[in-house]
């Protein structure tokens, strides 16, 4: 196999496909604005060029301020795992466009990091017949937006991508030991919560109460904006142009959220007039859960005082009301 470790593991996996309903570049080829010619398109930017599918080489445990020790390849780039994969048995569910954003780490020439159990290293045969490195059974990837050693830009993306710790679990600074999920079941809360937010917080109880869904989104009409999405209180819903739908990421964090509160998850049955395609929930790195429309995270504006207000429209040239199909409404 070419792997320098105490023992070698080989596992075969059936052909895999990108998870049904996931957001992908093919969904965003057309203009992402509800305006005719002249309006600026806001499609998700193509992924930047990044690391390819090279083997890992000499792995290392690199300490980061955010996550503590993370597993890196021989070039110092952070290695990641995907919650939609499985470790028992090893199986990758990231192919096609997903694998362009998250290049696989090829099996082959790899050596365990100092202090790491070499028996954690293995490999899985992907649907295309190539072999991918695994750590503790989990297929290993890089993130194509990590440009230099120490970058952890893939951490928490979509609520399903996390840096590896040297033990094969999710990297988490000072976090308690992580239990492996059942082979085919969805992960437990501690497994899916972004490591930086793994400790219980006051927000956790409300996130764990799906029996009382938030009031549904609906469509309102405005003389200038036309049909646009409002929340259950009739407040205008907005999108942020610096967010992306592929990968599904919110770039409104910290003080930004005080002005632009996230729209909490809404049951599809509780929404009226909204396009349901890619009507998903984003698990944010800060621990909150956020509704998306066509994979775009949505917000309200603290400066809107009553239903019908559209004071957030055009703010900073980056915030706009949302049409029923999730596109930007760019009229002022």
Image (cartoon, helix red, strand yellow):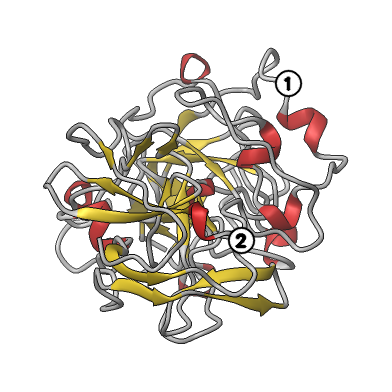
Q: Compare marks 2 and 1 and give the one earlier in the sequence.
A: 2
Height in image: 234 above or below 252?
A: above
Q: Which of 3 and 70 is in front in this view?
A: 3
**Residue 130: x %, y % from top left:** 16, 53
Side of 282 relative to 41 (left or right): right
Q: Which of 173 and 255 is in front in this view?
A: 173
Quarter of the image holding residue 16? top left
**Residue 13: x %, y % from top left:** 24, 35
Image quadrant in which the N terminus is located? bottom left
Quarter of the image holding residue 61? bottom right
Side of 199 relative to 14 (left or right): right
Mark pair 2, 1: CA separation: 31 Å
CB atoms of marks 2 and 1 within 8 Å: no
Camera sees residue 42: no
Height in image: 126 above or below 219?
A: below
Mark 2 element type:
loop
**Residue plotted at (76% across, 63% down):** 173
Height in image: 176 above or below 67?
A: above
Please name which of the two marks, 2 or 1, marks the residue nearer to the observer: 2
Camera sees residue 261: yes
Q: Nearer the viewer, residue 78 or 201?
A: 78
**Residue plotted at (36% across, 60% down):** 331
Q: Residues within 10 Å of mark 2 (few under 14, many from 20)?
A: many
**Residue 48: x %, y % from top left:** 29, 76
Residue 135 image label: none
Q: Residues within 10 Å of mark 1 (few under 14, many from 20)?
A: few
Report the residue that reaches farthest toward the front: 6
Residue 209 image label: 1
Q: Nearer the viewer, residue 309 or 83?
A: 83
Residue 165 image label: 2
């Amino acid at each position: 196999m070419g792997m320098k470790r105490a023992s070698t593991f080989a596992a075969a996996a059936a052909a895999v496909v990108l998870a049904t309903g996931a957001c992908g570049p093919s969904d965003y080829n057309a203009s992402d604005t509800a305006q005719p010619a002249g309006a600026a398109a806001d499609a998700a930017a193509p992924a930047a060029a990044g690391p390819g599918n090279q083997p890992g080489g000499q792995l290392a445990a690199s300490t980061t301020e955010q996550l503590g020790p993370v597993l890196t390849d021989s070039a110092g780039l952070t290695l990641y795992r995907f919650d939609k994969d499985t470790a028992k048995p090893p199986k990758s569910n990231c192919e096609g466009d997903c694998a362009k954003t998250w290049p696989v780490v090829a099996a082959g020439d790899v050596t365990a990091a100092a202090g790491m159990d070499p028996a954690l290293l293995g490999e899985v045969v992907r649907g295309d017949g190539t072999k991918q490195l695994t750590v503790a059974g989990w297929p290993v990837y890089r993130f194509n937006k990590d440009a230099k050693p120490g970058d952890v830009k893939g951490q928490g993306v979509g609520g399903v991508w996390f840096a590896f710790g040297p033990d094969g679990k999710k990297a988490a600074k000072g976090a308690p030991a992580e239990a492996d999920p059942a082979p085919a079941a969805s992960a437990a809360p501690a497994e899916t919560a972004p490591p930086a937010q793994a400790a219980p917080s006051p927000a956790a109880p409300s996130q764990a109460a799906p029996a009382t869904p938030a009031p549904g989104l609906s469509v309102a009409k405005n003389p200038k904006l036309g049909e646009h999405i409002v929340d259950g209180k009739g407040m205008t819903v907005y999108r942020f142009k610096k967010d992306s739908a592929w990968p599904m990421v919110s770039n409104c964090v910290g003080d930004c959220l005080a002005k632009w509160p996230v729209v909490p998850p809404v049951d599809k049955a509780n929404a009226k007039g909204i396009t349901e395609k890619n009507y998903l929930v984003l698990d944010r790195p800060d621990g909150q859960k956020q509704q998306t429309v066509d994979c775009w995270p949505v917000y309200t504006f603290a400066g809107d005082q009553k239903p019908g207000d559209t004071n957030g429209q055009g703010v900073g040239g980056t915030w706009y009301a949302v049409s029923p199909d999730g596109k930007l409404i760019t009229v002022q």
